Amino acid sequence: MNRAKTNRLERKLTYRMVQVQILAMLLFFGACVFPLVVYPIYRELGDAKTLDITVSEPFAQSLRADDGGGLVVTPTPGLQKLISAFPQIWFHASTEAGATVSIGAMPPIYSEIAARSWDFESFDARTVDSGKGGIGLRTEQSTVGPVRIMTGNGPVISAANMIAWVLGGLAAGIAVTVVIVSAVVIPIVVRREMRGLKAAAAQARLIHSHARGARLSLEDVPDEVAPLVLSVNDALTRLDESYVARERFLADSAHELRTPIAIMQTRIEAEEPFPAQTRLLVDVARLSSLADQLLDLQRMDLTGTRFGPVDLNEVASEVVGDLAPLANAAGYELSLIAADDPVIVDGDTGSLVRALTNIVQNAVAYGGQRGEILVQVDRNGSMSISDDGPGIAKHERDRVLEPFYRVTHTTRGTGLGLNLVDLIIRRHQGHLSLGDAASGGAMFVVSLPLKSVGPE
């Protein structure tokens, strides 16, 4: 049954884990970032605006030593751009040796602090006029070595800016983490956890009617799914038991049929010749072959018959020799064309003989009671059986191997013979096909894999 949409557990689990991850991040922001980071920043800074201390770096890059050991300023493009944007900005730089240089109008109130700048590592100060941003002192590296730089009236940072930077950095890091985890980590984790289910599914696909005792493994299967796997295994056990019971019934039934069939054949043969005697003997022979094939199938299923080397030339020769009198009495000439060399396959001699017997008997029954029935063995591992009868229509060929199917309702037989032949051939890893004979009659081709010959 086709499903309207996919319902893959692996994909659904991945989606759910991604959703949970995003929800956890939102809760992290709400429960941790805002109360522990955002609120303290806002409470500390309020409406004040703090000087952006990064402006001291372009000033430090503009410092040069003069010939007298002092400092001079050679504005870099970055410093020029900064001064253009903030005309009132000022800088004061000093070295540990006492060399100083200033640009801009530093308020006199800061002169004493500037003279003692090497007493401080760094500081920030906000003035009453929050728009001015206060002053700041930082230590920077320059071409003349470490310098203390004081600055003021430059760009400022509000609490909102700092919060935005913090949240932006966190959001970017979290977004990258979520993408990596969602695209790589979660699918790998889910796929690894689904290994047990996939292994059980692979085992289930290999189970067929002849794989008795097969069960699904519980290894790596999640506990939530284990009851389902156990139920499937219980169902397989019940199926095995029912198959065994059915096969024993069929085997017993086929065995019981052999005695009355043999008695019937003996009685018909003992009678004085009468018009329907030959046809009755053909029908009895087909019934006997049918019972034998049922026993062959059950024997192979129940006891696991071990195959051995079988020469198809010998199989064909035995069948033709046994059925020649019956075929001749029915109006046919039964012939054999054997291969020049032995054609060895891996199989069960008895069941192959009975399968070929059934096909020849079928030709005797439906070949029109005239012409030749030819059995030919090819060195590629195939046997063909052709007759000069009316043949089988192409639209019927796919169905004549089905159980209980008959070409016409007036056809004698149960419709089981060819189906049993097909089952036996498939047990031998072979194939039974139908075609047209050169004379226009039916041709059955049994193809079996040749037995590989290893070094002795």
Image (spheres, rainbow, N blue to C red):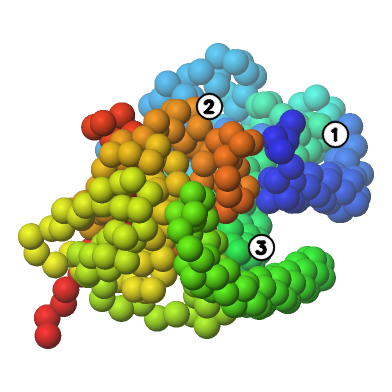
User: Element type at marker 1?
Assistant: loop
Going from N to C along the chain, the mark reached first, 2 or 1, is 1
The amino acid on which the numbered mark 1 sits, given as a three-letter code, is: Ala
Does residue 251 sit above or below 27 in this rendering?
A: below
CA distance separating discs 1 and 3: 61 Å
- Number of residues whose C-alpha sits closer than 10 Å to that of mark 1, classed few (under 14), some (14–19) or many (20 or more): many
Residue shown at 87%/49% (left/top)? Answer: 27
Q: CA distance from mark 3 to mark 2?
A: 75 Å
Quadrant for residue 444, please give it: top left
Q: Which mark is residue 62?
A: none
**Viewer-side label of 1, 3:** 3
* Residue at image mark 3: 197
Q: Secondary structure at mark 2?
A: strand
Identify the amino acid type marked 2. Answer: Ile
Mark 2 to mark 1: distance in Å? 26 Å
Say left or right for 440 vs 426. left
Front residue of this view, candidates 21 and 235:
235
The foreground one among 186 and 264 is: 264
Name the residue carrying label 2: 103
Q: Nearer the viewer, mark 3 or mark 2?
A: 3
Tell whether 338 sits left or right of 400. left
Q: Quadrant of residue 153?
A: top right
- Quadrant (top left/top right/bottom left/bottom right) for the C terminus: bottom left
Q: Is residue 102 above or below residue 342?
A: above
